[in-house]
Amino acid sequence: MQTRALDHDSRQSSRLAIRVYYEDTDAGGVVYYANYLRFLERARTEFLRVHGFEQSALLAQGIAFGVRSFSAEYLKPARLDDELSVVSAIESLGRAQVFFDQRIERGGELLLHAKIRVACFDPSRGKAQAMPKEIHDKFRILL
């Protein structure tokens, strides 16, 4: 899966380009359903990065984000060699969790729409924790 730089659609959302490779597909050349989760995860990681938060630096500070719940509507299949766009935006925000609205598109056509609830937690204890103020404040601006 090739990815390209993250572009901003607006102040609130970001777009990540992803090319579909053979390894992403099933025997019929259609993207295997679980691989969409990888595309969404990669886009959220790049969303954090473009807003100044590297996952490795956060982990070194005892801060991690993990998916708590996920729902998706698979509308149309992506296929081998497609160039997809994963659009990520923050839908709402709590002290220890953030709700993402994500879409996967091909040429402006909606293929998948997902809602993801991500919790902030301390990886050494495995317990939820409030987001650091700097991250929370940045996310609040993006709402």
Image (spheres, rainbow, N blue to C red):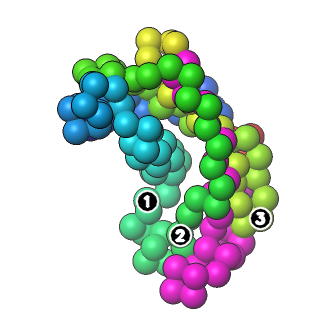
Q: Residue at x 55, y 18 (%)?
A: 110
- The answer to whether 83 is drawn above or below residue 43 in the figure is above
- The answer to whether 52 is drawn above or below residue 111 in the figure is below
Q: Residue at x 51, y 12 (%)?
A: 108
- The answer to whether 118 is drawn above or below residue 81 in the figure is below
Q: Amino acid at mark 3?
A: Arg
Asked if the residues shown at circle 3 and circle 2 are in contact, with their CB atoms under 8 angstroms apart, the answer is no
For residue 133, what is the image quadrant?
A: bottom right
The picture places residue 54, in percent across and down from the top left corner, at: 43, 59
Name the residue beneath numbered marker 3. 95
Please tell me whether residue 135 belongs to the stretch shown in magenta.
yes
Stretch in magenta: 110-138
Name the residue beneath numbered marker 1. 54
For residue 143, what is the image quadrant?
A: top right
Q: Amino acid at mark 1?
A: Glu
Q: Is residue 114 left or right of residue 97?
A: left
User: Which residue is nearer to you in this view: 54 or 101?
Assistant: 101
Name the residue beneath numbered marker 2. 64
The picture places residue 30, in percent across and down from the top left corner, at: 34, 26
User: Which residue is nearer to you in this view: 101 or 94?
Assistant: 101
Is the residue marked by circle 1 packed among few (<14), some (14-19), or many (20+) residues within 10 Å? some
Is the residue marked by circle 3 packed among few (<14), some (14-19), or many (20+) residues within 10 Å? few
Identity of the residue furthest to the front in this view: 27
Q: What SS does tag 3 mark?
A: loop
How many angstroms separate mark 2 from mark 1 (CA)?
11 Å
Quarter occupied by the N terminus: top left
Q: Amino acid at mark 2?
A: Ala
Residue 5 visible in the current orientation: no
The picture places residue 15, in percent across and down from the top left corner, at: 48, 30
